[in-house]
Image (cartoon, helix red, strand yellow):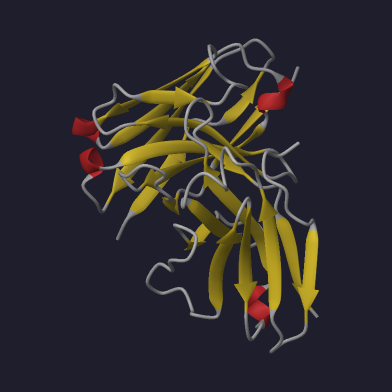
Amino acid sequence: QVQLVESGGGLVKPGGSLKLSCAASGFSFSDYYMTWIRQAPGKGLEWVSYIGTDGYSTYYADSVKGRFTISRDNAKNSLYLQMNSLRAGDTAVYYCAKTRPTIGGWFDPWGQGTLVTVSS
Amino acid sequence: QSALTQPPSASGSPGQSVTISCTGTSSDVGAYTYVSWYQQHPGKAPKVIIYEVIKRPSGVPDRFSGSKSGNTASLTVSGLQVEDEADYYCSSYAGSNNLWVFGGGTKLTVL
């Protein structure tokens, strides 16, 4: 079955960096868009970043543009999110999600999430 | 502040129906038929229950239905069951810069 497993979260100081990974299995990874979505503790969902099938088409939320970089390695069935210049407001559970490869595609399924805490 | 507006809470008794609204703008909900709804139980990852406004993924009970009128989308849960108690989030494709936007979520309580 389709499985997405995020890793790489943890505690980091403001201004620091962290790289999240998402290992995919059970589907043809290279045929699907992928998306990162985050959820601050006790808060709602926020779309963070999207990447197309070939890795060249990328988009970012205004809140992370210029600080985060999404990438993928189709040979390793893996998705990444490099997060730099981290702020307290970036504290959240980060989910990766398989995204239907059409305009406006939906997110299904989601991984279990990895918690990123930005604090001194 | 979320881009899409949802009521923070909704409730109903078992067997009843409840509708949750999701209001956006002519740049997101009103512009595309790409509204999806996600159910999230405490401590769990969200799960899609409606996509492209009205479509249900296989395995999702037909008690869940979606609709849209203008800039407002709606999720209706008919025949409420105890296991429907969860947080529900709407999402819309928005094109251009911020590709997708979410609602702030609605906590559904089954009394």
The answer to whether B56 appears left or right of A62 in the picture is: left
The answer to whether B106 appears left or right of B55 in the picture is: right
Q: Is residue A54 above or below residue A35?
A: above
- Point out residue A79 in the picture as x, y percentages from the top left corner: 36, 32
Q: Is residue A12 above or below residue A66?
A: below
Instruction: Look at 55% across and 15% down and name the residue there.
Output: A17
Instruction: Look at 65% across and 60% down and name the residue there.
Output: B88
- Would you identify the image quadrant in which residue B65 lies? bottom right
The answer to whether A104 appears left or right of B5 in the picture is: left
- Point out residue A56 in the picture as x, y percentages from the top left corner: 29, 21
Image quarter in which the N terminus of chain A is found:
bottom left
Work out whether residue A23 or residue A104 is closer to the camera in this orientation and state it. A104
The answer to whether B11 appears left or right of A31 in the picture is: right
Image quarter in which the C terminus of chain A is found:
top right
Work out whether residue A20 or residue B66 is closer to the camera in this orientation and state it. B66
Q: How many marks?
A: 0
Instruction: Look at 62% across and 76% down and name the residue there.
Output: B77
Q: Is residue B48 above or below residue B56?
A: above
- The residue at the far bottom in this view is B15
Instruction: Look at 77% across and 79% down and name the residue there.
Output: B12
- Point out residue A81 in the picture as x, y percentages from the top left corner: 45, 25
Work out whether residue B17 or residue A95 is closer to the camera in this orientation and state it. B17
Work out whether residue B104 or residue B27 is closer to the camera in this orientation and state it. B27
